[in-house]
Image: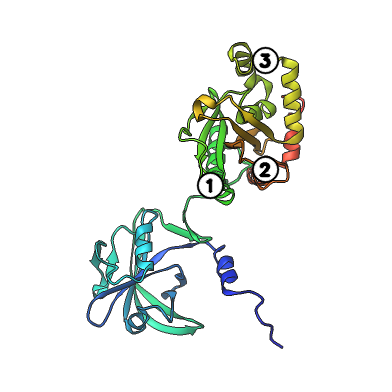
Amino acid sequence: MGHEAAFDSRALRQVLGAFVTGVTVITTLDRDGRPQGLTANSFSSVSLDPPLILWSQSLTAPSHPVFREAERFVVNILADDQVEVSNRFARGSADKFAGCATRPGLGGVPLIEGCSAWLECRRIDSFPGGDHVVFLGQVDRIERTGRQPLVFGGGRYLVAQPHDLGDAASGAGANIARLKAVRLATRALVELSDELDETLGLGVWGNKGPTIVRWEEASQPVSDNLRTGLVLPVLTSATGLAFAAWLPREATAPFVEAELAHDAAARGLDAAELEQQLAQVRATGIVRLVGTDAFADLYGTSISAASVPVFDASGAMVLALTTIGNTQRLDLGEGGRLVGGLRQCAATLSHRLGARSTVAANDSQENDP
């Protein structure tokens, strides 16, 4: 006996969105020689010998009668700077080609300029597929540029990049490994900021101390003064305290000693109090600063902040994931979505960078703050 599907079309669309695809515009000519086109991510390769591809179109698409009869079509694989082209051909406007640069291909079918690649095809068959028709085409001519392709997944446009890790545990140099970690973490930071709608920063340990190399703003940014390359104090910033807690003492000592001696905001601390504070940070795995005025001159208000460490395969801290926000709206509670999201993101990044576990990484630094 058959089973009815226990999901609706929206849920199915969301699940299918987990499969990331490229973005194409399929073009052809109608019987009067007028260009027609639509955006499609249903394109796929079928065979190399003979060279076959397929794509599908909704039966209700306005241009479906044209493609159903067309003998030729072109698969224009869009480049990553052609979001506007994708949106243009996804809409049902009367003249999608107005202002769009094209050149004629085989049979006069238009090729859209600026794409990543083109496949000029002859339709050889079509097949019913529920509320769609699947078109099978034989590739007659191809062309490729050096442009990066546009990518779509999870309901939004993405950018394709080489996988950062390769062999995470290989003998890559420390600087190369850190650059890979930053690239990997940047994408995770964007996703987490979108999910939580909070301002997040990515910190590294630079030659001048804790340095923010990326900000992702919330819909209500804490300040207009957020900037990359911002060098933070060690003892009065969440990012700085995270590095002070997990980096080896010899790396942070010159900065800590200078701030204890000359920074008015840190001068009230003594060495014993600092070690106790850092031990508490390592024990909880997170830095929390609530209602600090240390950055009032920069941000114009009191802020709260939190920071969590990211570790590499050697157990060394390589990155800090930091959030800042208005004290009244930033929820730094342990059971909240923000802290939970930061912890999970840091743990995932650490795992992908080859760390055995964040707990193991914490323990490895316990006696060498």
Outermost residue, top side: 261
User: Would you place residue 107 above or below residue 296 in this image?
Assistant: below
Identify which amino acid the numbered label 3 is placed on. Answer: Gly
Q: Residues within 10 Å of mark 2 (few under 14, many from 20)?
A: many
**Quarter of image, res 271:** top right
Q: Is residue 98 left or right of residue 215?
A: left
Q: Residue at x 50, y 40 (%)?
A: 221
Q: Residue 18 in the image: state x and y as whole percent.
A: 57, 62
Query: Could you tell me how far apart the alpha carbons at marks 3 and 2 are, in whole angstroms?
Result: 28 Å
Q: Residue at x 53, y 47 (%)?
A: 190
- Residue 339: image tag: 2
Q: Is residue 133 left or right of residue 189?
A: left
Q: Residues within 10 Å of mark 3 (few under 14, many from 20)?
A: few
What residue is pinned by disc 1?
190
Q: Nearer the viewer, residue 146 or 247?
A: 247
Mark closer to the observer (3, 1) = 3
Q: Secondary structure at mark 3?
A: loop
- Residue 115: image tag: none
Question: Is residue 173 among the parts visible in the rendering?
Answer: no
